[in-house]
Amino acid sequence: MTRWACWAVALLSIARGGLGTDVLQQRRTFSASKTFGELYERYADGLAVAIAEAAAFCAQPGQPGCLSDAVEMEIAYLRIRHARPGLVWEASPHHGYSSTWILRALEDNHHGRLVSFDLINKADPFVMKHRRRWSFVVGDFRQTFPLQAAGGVLPDYLLLDSFHSAAFGQFYVSTVFPAFHSHTLVSIHDVFNSAFWSDTQRGRNLTVYPAYLPNEEGIIILSWLAFQEDKSACRVFTFARERAPTELHELAEHRKIALGNSSMLDVTAAMNPTLFFELNCQRT
């Protein structure tokens, strides 16, 4: 079967709910016993500080903007607080907005390090102040990942936000994910971003590619996830507005109860396009 035929099958399956219902297990959990509502309540104080720091980061003069929506970074913070990873890798942090969230979670845990990968180091002073927990690797992630992985020390949490294209998606499923042999948490940004189909072209034809569909990178990743054995990947979920509106609204209610006046942001208005899952675990 050709690549385009595979894409056609994947698109049809997603459109009919196949990959959507089987892979996107719309649970508000990432472990057997902890719901995100419970985690919002458990880590509310630390999360309030992280939210304030993120707001200060975004308000800086000349700051190019915050490229991730609120809920998805809060979920990343909560996952890190709960799982207590010893090592986190992030690909393409740009000016470091996602880095500030990750480093705040590691600091609050008093445990763990962050390694960032990008073509150019544009790290903000907010990131640099956590230098003791942070290091930077310069270069194309497709080249630096194999070199770093060859050292045998792989992360417990992986955040991917590189060039969004089918080629990068294929790199992830053929090279990155198979390299992990132990339990790993994964976040991939922009999978359900309805504003574009790929970084190789501008905009998105919503008649051809409806808003609820993942982008072309996401098609590759969700297709791979759909055909894994039970222990290869589990707890696949998103709070993307276009894909999981009910779950997003329910999460917003939990968030409101836990945080009170710490954040009055209407999180349901943002796209929150990240896809979350775990590698090498048993689906439950």
Image (tube, rainbow, N blue to C red):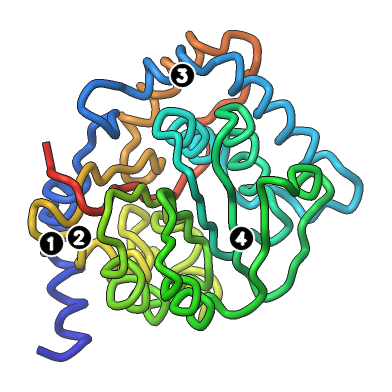
- Assign a secondary structure to mark 3: helix
**Residue beneath disc 1:** 228
Q: Distance between the residues labelled 1 and 2?
A: 5 Å
- Label 1 environment density (alpha carbons within 10 Å; few <14, some 14–19, many ≥20): few
Could you tell me if the residues under marks 4 and 2 are in contact, i.e. CB atoms within 8 Å?
A: no
Q: Quadrant of residue 45?
A: top right
Q: How far apart are marks 4 and 2 (CA)?
A: 25 Å
Residue 107 place in picture, x, y as percent: 64, 32
Among numbered discs 4 and 1, the one appearing first in the sequence? 4
Q: How far apart are marks 1 and 3 (CA)?
A: 31 Å
- Assign a secondary structure to mark 1: loop
**Residue beneath disc 3:** 40
Amino acid under disc 2: Leu
Indicate the quadrant containing the C terminus: top left, top right, bottom left or bottom right.
top left
Q: In this view, does 115 lie above or below 268?
A: below
Give the residue drawn at x 68%, y 22%: 49
> Residue 116 bears which disc, if any?
4
Residue 193 in sight from this viewpoint: no
**Residue beneath disc 2:** 225
Amino acid under disc 3: Tyr
- Label 3 environment density (alpha carbons within 10 Å; few <14, some 14–19, many ≥20): many
Among numbered discs 1 and 3, the one appearing first in the sequence? 3
Q: Distance between the residues labelled 2 and 3?
A: 28 Å
Q: Distance between the residues labelled 4 and 1?
A: 28 Å
Amino acid under disc 1: Gln
Q: Nearer the viewer, mark 3 or mark 4?
A: 4
Q: Is residue 279 left or right of residue 16?
A: right
Give the residue drawn at x 11%, y 49%: 22
Q: Is residue 176 left or right of residue 271?
A: left
